[in-house]
Image (spheres, rainbow, N blue to C red):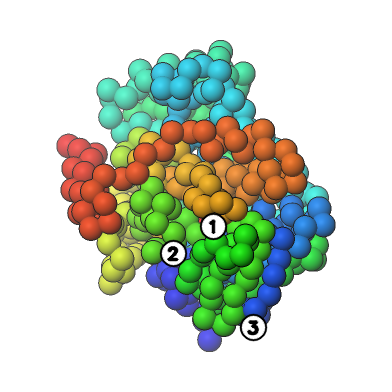
Amino acid sequence: MTYQSPIAPGVSLYEDGLERPRYPALDGSCTADVAIVGGGFAGLQSACRLAENGVDVVLIEQARLGDGASGRNGGQMGTGQRSWPEDHAEKLGHAAAKALFDIAESGKRHLHDFAERHGIDIEYRPGQLSVVHKRRYLAAYRRHADRVAERYDYPHLRFMDAEETAERLGSRAYLGGVRDTGTGHINPLKLVVGTAIAASAAGARLHEDTRATDIARADGRVRITTPTGTITADRVLIAGNGYVGRLESQTAAHVMPIRSFIAATEPLGPQTDVLPGGEAVDDSRFVVRYFRKNAEGRLLFGGRETYSRDNPRDIAAPMRQQIARLYPQLSDVAVTHAWGGTVGITVPRDPFVREVMPGATAVGGFSGHGVVLANYTGKLYADAVLGDDSAFAQLAAMPVSAFPGGRSLRTPLLFAALTWFALRDRV
Ligand SMILES: Cc1cc2nc3c(=O)[nH]c(=O)nc-3n(C[C@H](O)[C@H](O)[C@H](O)COP(=O)(O)OP(=O)(O)OC[C@H]3O[C@@H](n4cnc5c(N)ncnc54)[C@H](O)[C@@H]3O)c2cc1C
């Protein structure tokens, strides 16, 4: 029988037919040096690095590893942080902006090295296009490409005019953009599964179907309560991201869960004019549309967002419409899979990294940019535990404010704000 995740709608293309090892639920109480809540990129990277360095580590995941955003996303390895470095420079100064950009670039290198070292086939395909849907954004994109080359030592971004953009997309729906040859896209669930296997082989104890219901200080350590036992640890990493709910109030106040959806078509065949160069694409809309062809030649198209916890009755239908508008030649192509996941976003779109109680640190809110950053933040947390917190401290120093409105008002307020921005996309 096909597995349907209890925390996310639809069966993803990635999980269909992929062998995923099962890890037992926690049974009874235990202790550890470090306990981790959340089996996505951040939690698993930390677990792996800590275990490889002889730290006794336990990780619990409420569903299956990768059932969160990490196993269900668009697979695009964005360059830099989610905000452009020139925007960071305005707020934080050039030195801090450059340091944050460089951390993200180290994250890219780490991801490739990690996959290679552990023999994980992440199906990497190079190339990324960021394309513009409104004429008035063109100048900013051109300036961005120049600045990133000049001031951030990143020579891989180049502005594309309308003609080149149309050729590379196989569609005239966009007016220009930038081409990034320094990054690409991957199969994210294969990375999750491979990281879990590596972590487990290194001695990390991984438990699926185990939900943390409480985290509190107890006898000078931190205690996690679950329905089937407690874990007492010197340190706890809360990597629950947009799924954390009421478990931890600071994460809940700073990381807003938003649903995003992806549809995958049948393989398009070798003759198609859609994305002939194989790049991944994201666009300039507030509700970003993101798409790519995978190694099999299927189009994976993401874009629709919802701000409530209710699942749409038909995920595929609106995605099919968006695909047909962009690529009329694909109007009759079958959509074989459609699924959703929860993106954790923050107000400034920078990651939320914070000690939330003595011994307990939360990470999350990678704002649609976590393929590189969530993995690397997990690695950097482990480095901090192992004694080098230089890079992790820089992430923790980013000013991230809470969403206004408190628990009861923030969702309706955000819904109103996001709906307004989504409307502006269409005008
Ligand atoms: C549809 C979609 C498309 C995306 N596309 C891209 C993209 O193309 N590029 C990009 O860079 N980023 C993308 N993202 C964002 C990216 O996937 C995330 O930033 C990243 O995966 C976050 O990793 P994480 O480890 O912080 O959290 P997650 O992967 O969300 O993992 C958190 C885990 O914690 C578990 N958890 C939460 N609470 C508890 C609890 N109480 N007890 C036990 N377990 C708990 C959850 O079940 C979940 O598995 C996308 C996200 C989505 C949903």
Count neighbours of disc 2 (C-alpha within 10 A) and say few if under 14, some if 14 to 19, many if 20 or more: some
Q: Earlier in the sequence, mark 3 or mark 2?
A: 3
Q: What amino acid type is highlighted by mark number 3?
A: Asp
Q: Residue lying farthest bottom?
A: 1
Count neighbours of disc 1 (C-alpha within 10 A) and say few if under 14, some if 14 to 19, many if 20 or more: many
C-beta proximity under 8 Å, tags 1 and 2: yes
Q: Is residue 218 left or right of residue 46?
A: left
**Residue at mark 2:** 247
Residue 144, position in %: x, y?
Answer: 45, 20
- Marker disc for residue 27: 3
Residue ID at (68%, 75%): 30
Residue ID at (60%, 45%): 377
Residue 382 versus residue 146 in the image, above or below: below
Residue 290, position in %: x, y?
Answer: 42, 46
Mark 1, secondary structure of its residue? strand
Q: Residue lying farthest front?
A: 219
Mark 3, secondary structure of its residue? loop
Mark 3 and mark 1: Cα distance apart in space: 20 Å
Q: What amino acid type is highlighted by mark number 2?
A: Leu
Closer to the camera, 286 or 221? 221
Mark 1 C-beta to ligand 1 under 8 Å: no
Q: Earlier in the sequence, mark 3 or mark 1?
A: 3
Mark 1 and mark 2: Cα distance apart in space: 9 Å
